[in-house]
Image (cartoon, grey):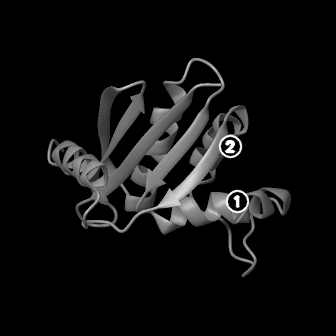
């Protein structure tokens, strides 16, 4: 399988408010940037959307090195929380409903198709690709 490196980030001005997401896909020395946004959204929705849009670009199963500064996304997937929420009818361990169920339902089949390795990176720090994704996301949010 091909190994693809993906960086993603989401941004929101106000929470909820206008938001954006950015992603960078790298394979075989080639980079592709993606971005988009929404007029009324949340930061977590934009974080999830960035991952969904990036994984949706992959035309075949791949090994994916996924980098994000979102603990919400990385921990829910890498620690298996989202699978527990789904099993319990989208109820979290604190008995409250899980949020963004529509996006999690879109993301889980994409994750299942690939061998994904999750990497949390500190936001607004020294990771050049994460910073670029942040720039893309912020620029998209300003369009609304």
Is residue 95 toward the left or the right of residue 46 in the image?
right
User: Is residue 144 depicted above or below 35 in this figure?
Assistant: below
Q: Residue at x 45, y 63 (%)?
A: 70
User: Is residue 126 depicted above or below 52 in this figure?
Assistant: below
Mark drawn on residue 122? none
Work out whether residue 24 or residue 105 is closer to the camera in this orientation and state it: 24
Mark 1 and mark 2 residues within 8 Å of each other at the beta carbon:
yes
Q: Secondary structure at mark 1?
A: helix
Rendered location of residue 117, percent (x, y): 61, 49
| Residue extending farthest front | 29
Mark drawn on residue 82? 1
Q: Residues within 10 Å of mark 2 (few under 14, many from 20)?
A: some
Image quadrant holding the N terminus, namely: top right
Q: Residues within 10 Å of mark 1 (few under 14, many from 20)?
A: many
For marks 1 and 2, give the CA distance: 9 Å
User: Is residue 43 depicted above or below 93 in this figure?
Assistant: above
Work out whether residue 24 or residue 88 is closer to the camera in this orientation and state it: 24
Q: Earlier in the sequence, mark 1 or mark 2?
A: 1
Image quadrant holding the C terminus, namely: top left
| Residue underneath mark 2 | 108
């Amino acid at each position: 399988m091909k190994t693809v490196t993906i960086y993603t980030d989401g941004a929101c001005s106000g929470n909820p408010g206008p938001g954006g997401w950015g992603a960078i896909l790298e394979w075989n020395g080639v980079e592709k940037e993606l971005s988009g946004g929404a007029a009324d959204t949340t930061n977590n929705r934009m974080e999830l959307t960035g991952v969904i849009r990036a994984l949706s670009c992959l035309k075949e199963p791949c090994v994916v090195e996924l980098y994000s500064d979102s603990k919400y996304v990385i921990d829910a997937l890498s620690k298996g929380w989202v699978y527990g929420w789904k099993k319990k009818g989208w109820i979290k361990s604190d008995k409250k409903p899980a949020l963004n169920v529509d996006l999690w339902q879109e993301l889980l089949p994409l994750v299942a198709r690939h061998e994904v390795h999750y990497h949390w990176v500190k936001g607004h720090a020294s990771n050049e690709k994460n910073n670029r994704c942040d720039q893309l996301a912020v620029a998209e949010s300003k369009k609304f």
